[in-house]
């Protein structure tokens, strides 16, 4: 710690030059570029896209909800990721978990994939029974958001919705009959 940090700060503070006759007196390890480099992922760092869910379609804001929609759409427009984010899970002010569907467009009220219709408008035990996921709190009548007591439960709600997604039908050509 002393040689990698304190020595440099102390020397700079006391006006001591780093170099004396070709040999450095201390190492400079706290440059701005060194600090930025520490934030970059290493070449062998595991891909974090699938840490929350193998699909890569669910992201987690572990420290609570924050304004995420504009940022998500900005990133998607610039990066064109191979997988589209469908759900965001986060904690609310009461420490409960929310599963929120990503809207089709930034200011749209239509979700990319809403929570199942059979869950919508249900609460507590009734929702537990229909969903098969114990500990549910609610699903909004439009299906854009739901609540659960635990992270695992909110994640289960998102995963169950992904599993119930209708399969994409291949386009049909009017020339083929």
Image: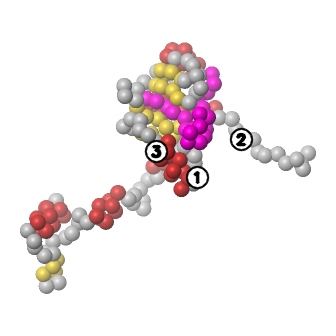
Tell me, for residue 51, which label it has, or none: 3
Q: How crowded is mark 3: few (under 14 residues within 10 Å), some or many (20 or more)?
A: few
Q: Is mark 2 on a helix, strand or loop?
A: loop
Could you say where residue 171 lies in the image, as x and y percent from the top left?
Answer: 78, 46
Tell me, for residue 105, which label it has, or none: none
Q: Main secondary structure of the magenta part?
A: loop
Q: Residue at x 76, y 45 (%)?
A: 170
Left or right: where does residue 108 sit relative to residue 32? right
Q: Can residue 49 be seen in this view?
A: yes
Mark 3 vs mark 1, foreground winner is 1
Which corner quadrant holds the C terminus? top right
Q: How crowded is mark 2: few (under 14 residues within 10 Å), some or many (20 or more)?
A: few
Q: Residue at x 48, y 25 (%)?
A: 147
What is the image's colouring? Answer: secondary structure
Q: Residues within 10 Å of mark 1 (few under 14, many from 20)?
A: few
Q: Indicate whether 69 appears above or below 92.
A: below
Q: Residue at x 51, y 50 (%)?
A: 74
- Between the residue at mark 3 and the residue at mark 2, the CA separation in whole angstroms equals 25 Å
Q: Residue at x 15, y 79 (%)?
A: 19
| Residue marked by disc 2 | 168
- Between the residue at mark 2 and the residue at mark 1, the CA separation in whole angstroms equals 17 Å
Left or right: where does residue 27 sit relative to residue 89? left
| Residue marked by disc 1 | 82
Write down the region rendered in magenta.
97-119
- Residue 108 lies in the magenta stretch: yes
Mark 3 vs mark 2, foreground winner is 2
């Amino acid at each position: 710690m002393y040689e990698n940090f304190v020595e440099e700060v102390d020397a700079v503070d006391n006006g001591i030059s780093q170099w004396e006759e070709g040999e450095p007196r201390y190492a400079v390890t706290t440059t701005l570029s060194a600090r930025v480099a520490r934030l970059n992922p290493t070449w062998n760092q595991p891909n974090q896209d699938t840490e929350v869910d193998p699909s890569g379609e669910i992201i987690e804001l572990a420290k609570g909800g924050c304004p995420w929609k504009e940022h998500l759409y900005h990133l998607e427009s610039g990066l064109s990721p191979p997988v589209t984010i469908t759900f965001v899970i986060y904690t609310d002010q009461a420490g409960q978990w929310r599963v929120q569907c990503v809207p089709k467009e930034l200011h749209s009220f239509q979700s990319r994939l809403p929570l199942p219709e059979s869950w919508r408008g249900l609460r507590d035990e009734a929702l537990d029974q229909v969903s098969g996921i114990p500990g549910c709190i609610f699903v909004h009548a439009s299906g854009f958001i739901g609540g659960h007591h635990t992270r695992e439960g909110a994640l289960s709600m998102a995963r169950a919705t992904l599993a119930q997604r209708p399969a994409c039908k291949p386009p049909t050509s009017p020339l083929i009959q």
